[in-house]
Every structure is written in structure tokens, then in C-alpha cells.
Image (spheres, grey):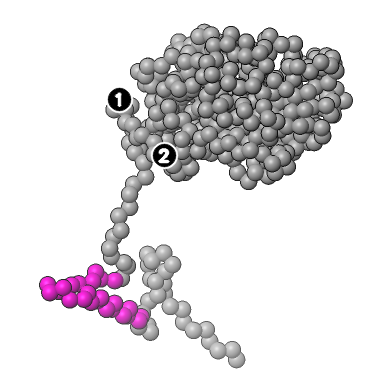
Amino acid sequence: MFSQFALHERLLKAVDELKFVEPTPVQAAAIPLALQGRDLRVTAQTGSGKTAAFVLPMLNRLVDLKQKRVEIRALVLLPTRELAQQTLKEVERFAQFTFIKAGLITGGEDFKEQAAMLRKVPDVLIGTPGRLLEQLNAGNLHLEHVQVIVLDEADRMLDMGFSEDVERLCNECPNREQTMLFSATTGGAGLRDMIGKVLKEPEHLMLNSVSQLAEGTRQQIITADHNQHKEQIVQWLLQNETYEKAIIFTNTRVMADRIYGHLVAKDYKAFVLHGDKDQKDRKLAIERLKQGGAKILVATDVAARGLDVDGLDLVINFDMPRSGDEYVHRIGRTGRAGNEGLAVSLICHGDWNLMSSIERYLKQSFERRVIKEVKGTYTGPKKVKASGKAAGVKKKKTDKKGDKKVAAKRKPTAKPKPNAPLASADGLAPLKRRKPAPAAE
């Protein structure tokens, strides 16, 4: 029960209103330590409830402060606009019975309107690093009174090249008392470097090892001959699988638009989401998917983070993601909050090694699936058998009594006769010997 936590009564009222009963494992592990003011480094599966794990302690720190709202007191950094918007909604839901106000700063929105919002000084500021730095450089953002910083999806921010931006924003908060870093994967050396720079004696919470991620999701691969064959498989899956909502991931915007066009031509209710879409279209696509106005979303990895949609139970990787961490975030869109999901990856000849490396990274073996109606010729790499005969060496023999094998001696290569014709470079015709040039007089 959430009442076991030392949370303010106004926050517990919101938790009760939102029908939160049992805390998830990440909430049970992180909230007590966060309430003590400890720095945290938390690795937890996507969809495990980690947003509430940092929002509730953060709001608890701010809820009883008596001073007027004259400075930003909490900063939440996230990699994408969609995730930032989702986090803003969560903060507003949990703060509904308090006087705490939150603001949002992301790209794709009017810069001057954001500057006007900052002049009202929200208690909690949520945003993406790039636009926050732009407002900071313009003199519109002041962070010297920030008490708590949250870095959510920190591994993704590093992948997107925000490492220096995140460090600078953290350095602009010299008086912070607590920093919490959350991610769905363990990341690499870059993440460890950031942890060393921005966290002070952090408590490490590993709620899921990589091999435990997405346990509620069936993971399958289907081999394909080429992209046109992949499109046929996608059509079959959408027609024959049982799903409420589906998302199809591609690696490029061009391919996302192509698949979307084919789906619309076949009267599917679909939307497309990628970096070329303006903020208004991106909001519309996600809202339509959430409200049921569309059943299918075609997207690049811009949608792999921060997309929390009820009933999203089918993920199709038209293109294999470029890393194991990205794969985890893609399939984390389904099988959320204990529900079951299905993730299908389409594998051509050029995808096999990448798929195998992701299997090794996850320490899992994906289910191989064949659909006879759209079966192709490619079934994976051919196994090459050892021939047992080396060039120019005869196989070793053994007598009936089991005596030691005796290797046959290689016959010496015959030397060409002095006057024999020489072979040409391509071995097709002999070359004529040139007569020696006459000696110089």
C-alpha cells in the first residue's frame, strides 16, 4: 500500500483518487530512499512505473514549502518531447490537490510563449536539454535555486548526443540537494562517466537485468527476402493477428512514410510519427492512437520513448533496431504493467548478424516463426560443414586393427621443363617465350 510511504496526505489523496493500490517493485525500492534525500541510480524496465517512483518523492519535497513561488525548485530532463509531455501529465495528476505548478520546455513549441511561462516561475520544470539550453542562453532560465534534478531515460539522452548539455544544465544547479538518474538499460561507459560527474554517493538499484527485460512480451523473428516481402508480411500480420493497437518501427523516415501510405491505401486507420513531423502532427498522432481513432502507428525511434498507450499489444520491427538498448525500448511499448504483448522482428539477409548480437546482449533466444501464406526463400545463414579434405592432402587412413593413421605424402610438384611454354596470368593460353635480346655491341 502507498500509505506505507511517508508521503504528504495531499499526495496520498491523489494516489487514492488515481486508483493506485500496490506499488510496483521499482516504486517500492526507490520511493523510501528518495524520500530520505539519497541520490539514486535506478535501472528498471520500461512500463514498470518508474515515473511515479521519482515524481512522488520530488513533489513531497516541495509540497510543504511556505515561500512564494519565486524560483524553479525541481528540474526533470528527458530525451524526447513525447516523454516530456507524458511526464508533465503525471506530475499534474499527482499534484492535483497541491499548489505545486509545473511547466514544459521542449522543441517544436513557440519560444516566446515558453519564455513568458518561465517568467511565472513554475515549481517543477520539465524539458528536453536542447531547448532548455536555448532558453538559458537567452537569459530566460534561472536554475540556481533548484533542489532536485531528475534525469529520466539518461541512456537515451547520451545516445542522442545530449551528454554535454545535460552536464552543463546540472552545473547550473549548484545548490541542488538530490539527483536521481533513471534508465531502462545499464548503458555503457558514457553513462558511467555521467553518473560519476552528477551523482554523489548514489544508491544503485537494479530492478531488472537485461535478460529479464520484456518478460511479458513474446519475441519472434520472421525471415524475409527483401523489403517488398517484409511489406507483405506486415499486411498479413495486421490482417490475422489479434490486437487492439499496433506500432510498426522503421529506421528511416522515408520507409515510415512508404508503409503509412500503403496502409492508408488499404483503408487502415493509421498515423505516422517521425522527426520531420511538426509538433502539432506528433501530438495528434499520439492522441488519436490513445483515444482509438487510429489502431496503427508507423514510427521511427522518436516514438520508442515516452509512448504510454493502453492496449498497445503488437510491435513490429520492420527494420531491426541498431542496438540492444533501442530494441528494449521499442518492445517496451507493449506488454506494459503486467499485460502480455507480441513483438515481431522481420529479418532479411543483412539483418541477421544484428539480430544475433541483440539476442546475445539480452541473453535470450527469439522464437523463430514461419507464416506459410507469405513464406519466402531466405531462412537464415547456411551452415557450412567442414570438408575433411584440405587442398592437396589426402584423407588419413586407419587399418582395421585401429593402428595410428598414416598421412599420405604429398606428391612433389613437377618443375616445368626449361623450354616449356609459360602459362598466362589468367591460365587460358600459354605465353610464348621471348628470344633473348642480342648483346649490346
Using the rendered view, name the quadrant where residue 180 is placed: top right
Name the residue rendered at 44%, 42% in the picture: 363
Residue that numbered label 2 is attached to: 364
Vertical order, 73 against 166 (above or below): above
156 falls in the magenta region: no
Q: Can residue 413 be spotted in the picture?
A: yes
Vertical order, 290 against 232 (above or below): above
Instruction: Name the secondary structure under disc 1.
Output: helix
Residue in the foreground of this view, choosing between 29 and 207: 29
Q: Amino acid at mark 2?
A: Gln
Residue in the foreground of this view, choosing between 337 and 111: 337
**Mark 1: few/some/many CA within 10 Å (<14, 14-19, 20+):** few
Name the residue rendered at 72%, 40% in the picture: 200
Name the residue rendered at 64%, 41% in the picture: 191
Q: Residue furthest bottom?
A: 441
412 falls in the magenta region: yes
Secondary structure mainly formed by the magenta segment? loop
The x and y percentages for residue 333 are 51, 24
| Mark earlier in primary sequence (1, 2) | 2
Q: Which mark is residue 373?
A: 1
The x and y percentages for residue 226 are 42, 33
- The reply, left or right, for residue 195 in relation to residue 405 is right
Q: Can residue 283 be spotted in the picture?
A: no
Instruction: Name the secondary structure under disc 2.
Output: loop
Name the residue rendered at 69%, 41% in the picture: 201
Q: Which residues are magenta?
A: 393-416
Q: Quadrant of the N terminus?
A: top right
The x and y percentages for residue 59 are 70, 20
Q: Amino acid at mark 1?
A: Glu
Q: Give the CA separation, mark 1 to mark 2.
A: 28 Å
Residue in the foreground of this view, choosing between 167 and 52: 52
Q: Quadrant of the C terminus?
A: bottom right
